[in-house]
Amino acid sequence: MTDEQARRRFAQARVARLATADALGQPHIVPMVFAVSRGSDGGDTVYSAVDAKPKRSRALRRLANVAANPRVAVLVDHYGPDWDALWWVRADGTGRILDADQPEARDAIARLVARYPQYREQPPLGPVLAIDVARWSSWSAAGD
């Protein structure tokens, strides 16, 4: 599949898996909801925000990892009983942590609220994780 097809499939998915690593390379992977934005320069950014879902702390390991090692990967996939329909798309990039009051973060939160009805009642408070995509990778059993 082309990078544009991969980006489109990725952007339509409802949940992704975020892979980060700490300064020593210890991996950490968590599910996340997200929104994708294409910048005026043509580059893509994936956004996710700390929300009100129950957590042990707002000081999340994924944010500490990005601060220590900004290289991240985000994976979406489709699996089911028809193995001819399997596919996955991965965005590799550089993570940045934005304070919720920054204009880019406010725009990201608005995108998340528009995408997920659950956020309309209680928008994420942030911080926001911005991932500048450096490369799209993909695979499809159908070969498209």
Image: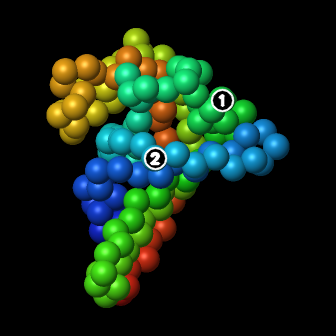
**Would you name the residue on which mark 2 appears?**
31
Residue 11 lies left or right of residue 68; in this view the side is left
Quadrant holding the C terminus = bottom left
**Left or right: 86 in relation to 110:** right
The foreground one among 25 and 97 is 25
What SS does tag 2 mark?
Answer: strand
**Which residue is at 42% across, 43% downward?**
32
Examine the image and state in which quarter residue 84 appears.
bottom left
Q: At label 2, which amino acid type do we have?
A: Pro
Instruction: State the residue lying farthest toward the top.
Output: 101
Residue named by callout 1: 64
Q: Quadrant of residue 22?
A: top right
Would you say residue 134 is visible in this rendering? no
Q: Are marks 1 and 2 in contact (CB under 8 Å)?
A: no
In the rendered image, the vertical position of residue 59 relative to residue 30, given as above or below:
above
At x 78%, y 39%, the residue is 23
Helix or strand or loop: what does disc 1 sit on? helix
Near mark 1 (Cα within 10 A), the count class, few <14, some 14-19 or many ≥20, is some
Sequence-wise, which precedes: disc 1 or disc 2? 2
**Color style of the picture:** rainbow
Q: Residue at x 47, y 21 (%)?
A: 127
Toward the viewer: 121 or 45?
121
Left or right of residue 114, residue 44 in this image: right
Task: Categorize mark 2 by other alpha carbons within 10 Å: few (<14), some (14-19), many (20+).
Answer: few
Residue 20 visible in the current orientation: yes
Expressed as whole percent of the image width and height from the top left, the position of residue 64 reads 66, 29
Quarter where residue 2 is shown? bottom left
**Dot 1 amino acid type:** Ala
Residue 24, image x, y percentages = 82, 43
Q: Please tell me which residue lies in front, 51 or 97.
A: 51
How far apart are the alpha carbons under marks 1 and 2? 16 Å
Look at 38% across and 22% down and name the residue there.
52
